[in-house]
Image: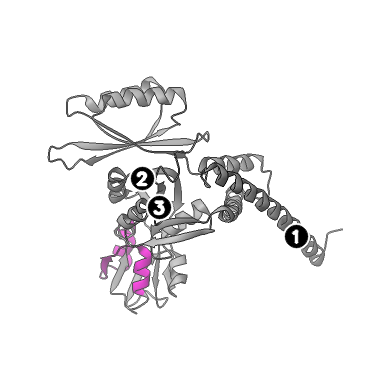
Amino acid sequence: MARTLPELRALIDAVDQELLSVLNRRAALANEVGEIKRHEGSVVFRPEREAQVIHGLQEANQGPLKSENVATIWREIMSACRALEAPQRVAFLGPSGTFSEAAALRFFGSSIQGVPCSSFDEVFHATTSGAATFGVVPVENNTEGVVTRSLDLMLQTPLHIIGEISLLVRHNLLRTSQSLEGIDVVLAHPQALAQCQQWLNLHLPNAERRAVSSNAEGARLAASHPNWAGIASERAGSEFGLHVAAHAIQDDAFNRTRFVVVCLPSSMPAPQASGHDCISLVVSVPNRPGAVHDMLVPLKQHGVSMTRFESRPARSGQWEYFFYIDLQGHPSQPHVAAALKDLQALCAFYKVLGTYPLAD
């Protein structure tokens, strides 16, 4: 005989009580771990350890929970337990409601102390100065390419990358009413305006497109004027009391942005190998024929896969370039270490931007 709704609810209530008891046991164990870490002077946050835990649980999962839901649930559990040891201060492009904040919450969980910043420069400054332990910044979009300011700042500052997040970005047109009529100005970050230009050309061809420091800032400004609209997340709409006049207006339905997490090496050293890792480098080579080709030879010889290759002007006035490279693997792997050693010997400039677990 099928169980009744009251019976099922009673069973769920009983399971919830069991879950609460088990979660508190986990939190107590996390407190003991925190005591040991404080005694040893070791770091609270270990992204490679958390990645290993989540991957292990996803492999062991037999449903009906989906693997991505397992990751979300356990990230929040670990975030809440981590906060018992020491809440993490995380800088991101603000105000509240930006995709950068969403990326920070995706990576760390919601039990953090957010530090909203007005620009990418301020995110790096806050993290370098110690006002925040970690910073979260976008580095590339699958349609608009790299975020050049983030790349430049990673070259110029002592921060290194310890993690990454790949976020599906859905842009929404937000305003004080639900209508598309009478919109004179659309406000958003330049990247968002570029990612929605076809939709704007079709639906709001006469509206001024005004670039602002972040999408959430555009939403904040749109809340102050009935003829203005912002392009931002639904979270930003809720934050500033706006209606969604049009959903998912990005030109690419699968629009994704990659974010990285940065910190001082003294705050947290490079994560140990997780089994699914990435190394980010920036290099330059002497300006001679075949130099770029020669730079890639060690990777082929040692069987190391390159997943990203971007060039940026070195701004030396000599038509020289920096090359930003992502490699699969971890320096603790002998073939990777050998490739890096041979590559460095060929470079006029060589800097490891970070070694970190790949995003889920």
Q: Position of residue 103 (x, y in %)?
A: 45, 54
Check residue 177 in the rendering and tell me which mark sits there, or answer none.
none
Please state which amino acid type lies under the numbered disc 2: Leu
Residue occupying image coordinates x 29% and y 59%? 190
Instruction: Evaluate whether residue 255 shows in this view.
Output: no
Q: Are marks 3 and 2 in contact (CB under 8 Å)?
A: yes
The local crowd at label 3, few if under 14, some if 14 to 19, many if 20 or more residues have their Cα within 10 Å, is many
> Mark 2 or mark 1: which comes first in sequence?
1
Stretch of the chain drawn in magenta: 194-222
In reply to whether residue 339 is colored magenta, the answer given is: no
In reply to whether residue 206 is colored magenta, the answer given is: yes
The local crowd at label 1, few if under 14, some if 14 to 19, many if 20 or more residues have their Cα within 10 Å, is few
Q: Which residue is mark 1?
A: 17
Q: Quick check: 28 left or right of 306?
A: right
Residue occupying image coordinates x 43% and y 73%? 240
Q: Secondary structure at mark 3?
A: strand
Q: Position of residue 43 (x, y in %)?
A: 51, 45
Please state which amino acid type lies under the numbered disc 3: Gly
